[in-house]
Image (cartoon, helix red, strand yellow):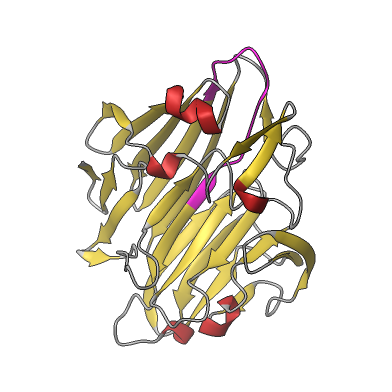
Amino acid sequence: MDYIIKNNDLTVKISTLGAELQSIKKDNIEYLWQGDEKSWKNKATNIFPYVGKMTEGKYIYKGQTYEMGSHGLARHIDFSVEEKEDEKITFKMSSNEDTLKNYPFLFDYFITYELKENTIFITSKVVNKDEKTMYFGLGGHPGFITPIDKGLSFDDYYLQFDNDCIVNNIRVTEKGLIRGKEEFSLKDNKILNLKHSLFDDDALIFENMAKGVTLKTDKDSKSVYVKYDNMTYLGIWHTPKTEVDFVCIEPWTSLSSRDGIIEDIEKQDNLVALDAKKEYENTWSIGIN
């Protein structure tokens, strides 16, 4: 089921399935990728409790092996609606018998979307209901229509970071598993000019990046601004070896598994370790200009 929140600037639609954004409109112009079975059918996947992929689709916890698909469980779950206002909505998923088969922790996971002027604030809240430490990663995977102006082309656009940064690019295999990292050169230390071939080897995954980035062009005034103060990594992606009209800007707290290693999640140092009965909260945002 879809729900709509709106204000004078934005109209935003969200599905209960995965609590996934379905539409972001300003002045009746769509900014969110609308999905395509031939390239990427999703629009803005919510990632929880694991970012990316696992070697052999498996991980280890307390000596036991579990299985989990790409980007975790939340994307496949029908969330309940906890609170709904004109400009704000909160979705909830909870652990159950099915989730415990793949992820042996008791939890509540909330996603809140709140509009303030031209910005969507997206807050993930994790409540550890268990008697043990809970290990997880989370993040967003929104795709933005590029070009926004239909008279332009994909490579008329670029990503501009808020400030100069010397970033590392986390390299991945064809299966999306971590195989190392290397320094990546941005133009003037803050600009990434878009071209389809950037993604021929899958996502660019940055660390040490500035905490905000704008999708923009010099040929039109419309832009998208993504801010992620408390995210450690930023994925930039579209379907490899294609010429599609979108780019994903993906703030993450953690990374995929290392190539060839079935990770012990108690030892994977980029995961959040949330103590028993504690809560974790992380907010990022999408601004439409």
Residue 174 placement, left or right of 139: right
User: Is residue 138 within the magenta segment?
Assistant: yes
At x 22% / y 63%, what residue is drawn? 27
Q: In the rendering, at what x and y percent does residue 184 appear?
A: 74, 73
Q: How many marks?
A: 0
Residue 31 in sight here: yes
Query: In the displayed structure, would residue 114 be above or below residue 226?
Result: above
User: Is residue 209 within the magenta segment?
Assistant: no
Q: In the rendering, at what x and y percent does residue 65 appear?
A: 67, 35
Residue 256 in sight here: no
Question: Which quadrant of the view contains residue 159?
Answer: bottom right
Residue 277 placement, left or right of 37: right
Position of the C terminus by quadrant: bottom left
Q: In the rendering, at what x and y percent does residue 16 appear?
A: 29, 39
Residue 29 placement, left or right of 94: left
Query: In the displayed structure, would residue 264 be above or below residue 194?
Result: above
At x 48% / y 64%, what residue is drawn? 248
At x 60% / y 18%, what residue is drawn? 278
| Viewer-nearest residue: 199 or 188 | 199
Q: Which residues are magenta?
A: 127-140
Query: In the displayed structure, would residue 143 be above or below residue 217?
Result: above
| Viewer-nearest residue: 104 or 46 | 104
At x 47% / y 61%, what residue is drawn? 225
| Viewer-nearest residue: 103 or 246 | 103
Position of the N terminus by quadrant: top left
Query: In the displayed structure, would residue 103 be above or below residue 48?
Result: above
Q: In the rendering, at what x and y percent does residue 251 appear?
A: 56, 52
